[in-house]
Image: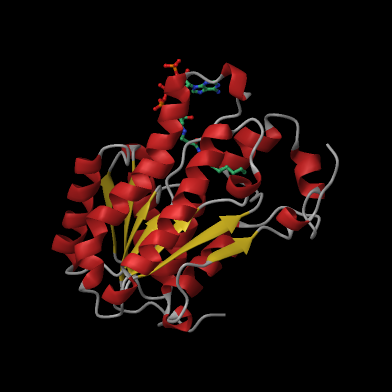
Amino acid sequence: MFAPDTLKNRVAFITGGAGDIGFEIAQTYGRLGARVVIASRNQTRLEEALSTLQQQGIEAAAIATDVRDADQVKRAIDQTVGRFGALDILVNNAAGNFHCPTAGLTPNGWKTVIDIDLNGTFYGCLAAYEHLKRSAHGGSIISIITMLGLTGWPGAAHAAAAKAGILSLSRTLAVEWGGDGIRVNTISPGPIGDTEGAKRMYLDTGRGDLERRKTALNRFGAKADVAHAAVYLASDMAGYVTGDNLVVDGGRWLKYVAA
Ligand code: HXC
């Protein structure tokens, strides 16, 4: 268990923060003392998520944002600093994905996912940089990717390429921005139950049982598993950790199960 003040006095901006893993991170950060801003496209989901956070006594705000639009991302991050006075943690979590064999993927289908995942992450990093530089705690960027970005992901070439791009971007920024006191890391979740991603990619395609067996631990993970990794990386406990990719996948990438 983390101490209740692990993230006290920190401000976090979380893209895709209204749902699934993003919301779990927002809630967990808030319970550990952070003020959190959640950014998602869907206003209704945002309002519900914000109200759930506030009911728990978490100081939070919600800003409707499409991460494909660099101006919207910059405006949302500037508003975060206007409201809470600083930005200490950026979590690039927003993602789009759908199962589609590559031969049937249209250029616009490809572009849509690259725009959300890779370009959205770049826009976030760019807009956050000057603020993170001024963080009293040292800035922290955490991006949610997947080891399938490195191994390849049949049926999701767009997302795999985007996630591999985010890993590369993160390692570049870890070095470029390390001197500014900004740490840049990624987390690679495996199959996480109760998420839109697992539903779309695994359950709806009839691969649920196979995907479970592909993990060394023989089970899907929980959203909290990813949130706890995100707490660690954002906290002082990871003060000397940068350019890392923390794998939270139940040992999936090391195990091979024939399809
Ligand atoms: C083939 C598809 C498609 C599908 C969309 N497209 N869905 N092609 N199969 N199932 C194509 C469209 O035909 C179109 O191309 C282009 O993609 C853009 O589609 P739109 O519907 O106009 O885009 P938009 O409304 O902006 O929606 C974006 C989206 C959508 C990514 C397509 O799925 C979305 O909003 N997703 C957000 C939620 C999400 O995906 N969550 C899961 C992320 S989890 P054309 O050529 O026709 O114009 C994750 C990790 C998963 O990433 C981990 C595994 C467990």
Residue 161 in the image, given as x and y percentages of width and height: 52, 40
Asked if residue 127 lies left or right of residue 144, the reply is: left
Asked if residue 25 lies left or right of residue 86, the reply is: right
Asked if residue 24 lies left or right of residue 71, the reply is: right
In which image quadrant can residue 66 be found?
top left
Residue 105 in the image, given as x and y percentages of width and height: 54, 21
In this picture, is 149 found above or below 144? above
Asked if residue 115 lies left or right of residue 244, the reply is: left
The quadrant of the rendering that contains the C terminus is: top right
- Residue extending farthest to the right is 258
At horizontal 57% and vertical 40% (from top left) the residue drawn is: 197
At horizontal 63% and vertical 24% (from top left) the residue drawn is: 101
Residue 182 in the image, given as x and y percentages of width and height: 33, 71
In which image quadrant can residue 172 be found?
bottom left
Residue 155 in the image, given as x and y percentages of width and height: 64, 30
At horizontal 38% and vertical 68% (from top left) the residue drawn is: 175
Considering depth in this image, is 251 or 212 the residue closer to the camera?
251
Q: Is residue 58 visible?
A: no
